[in-house]
Amino acid sequence: MSAEDLERYEAEMELALYREYRDVVGIFTYVVETDRRFYLCNSVDVKVRSETGDAYFEVTMTDAWVWDIYRPARFAKNVKVLTFKDVNVEELATSDFEPPKA
């Protein structure tokens, strides 16, 4: 497989992932961004932990969809993320549910 073939494959996978996102975004309430992933979910809880002196975030989500091109199953019933980096949580407004017209 050439580098060009690999780039074409990844571009096709990214487009398929975007189309899936566009199809499912309407069934979720929250967008959660961590340093490694982007999630859609219906319930999210963020706790700041500091048992060892360094603060970190414990993010728990239910009914989640994960933006990950290499993940075969993007839907997850429960997700737990531990991170030392920033976590961004946004509640989707009704107007955010409108996917672009094809």
Image (spheres, grey):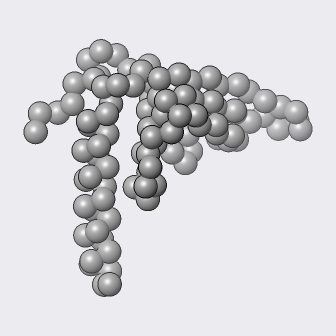
Residue 66 appears left or right of 2: right
Nearer the observer, 75 or 49: 75
Q: Residue at x 25, y 61 (%)?
A: 12
Quadrant showing the C terminus? top left
Above or below 13: residue 18: above
User: Along the horizontal axis of the image, is 41 left or right of 100?
Assistant: right
**Residue 18 point in image, percent of width and height:** 28, 46
Identify the residue at image location x=74%, y=36%: 56
Q: Nearer the viewer, residue 75 or 6?
A: 75
Residue that sits furthest to the top in the current view? 94
Residue 50 seen in the figure = yes
Q: How many marks?
A: 0
x and y, in percent, of residue 92 in the image: 38, 20
Q: Against 47, is 36 above or below?
A: below
Picture quarter containing residue 21? top left
Q: Quick check: 2 above or below 18? A: below
User: What residue is at 51 percent from the left and 39 percent from the top?
Assistant: 76
- For the point 54% across and 28% down, which residue is it? 62
Q: Looking at the picture, how far across and down is residue 30, in whole percent?
A: 45, 24
Q: Looking at the rendering, which quadrant does residue 22 occupy?
A: top left
The one of 66 and 89 positioned closer to us in this rendering:
66
On the rendered structure, is 11 left or right of 82?
left
- What is the x, y in percent for residue 98? 22, 24
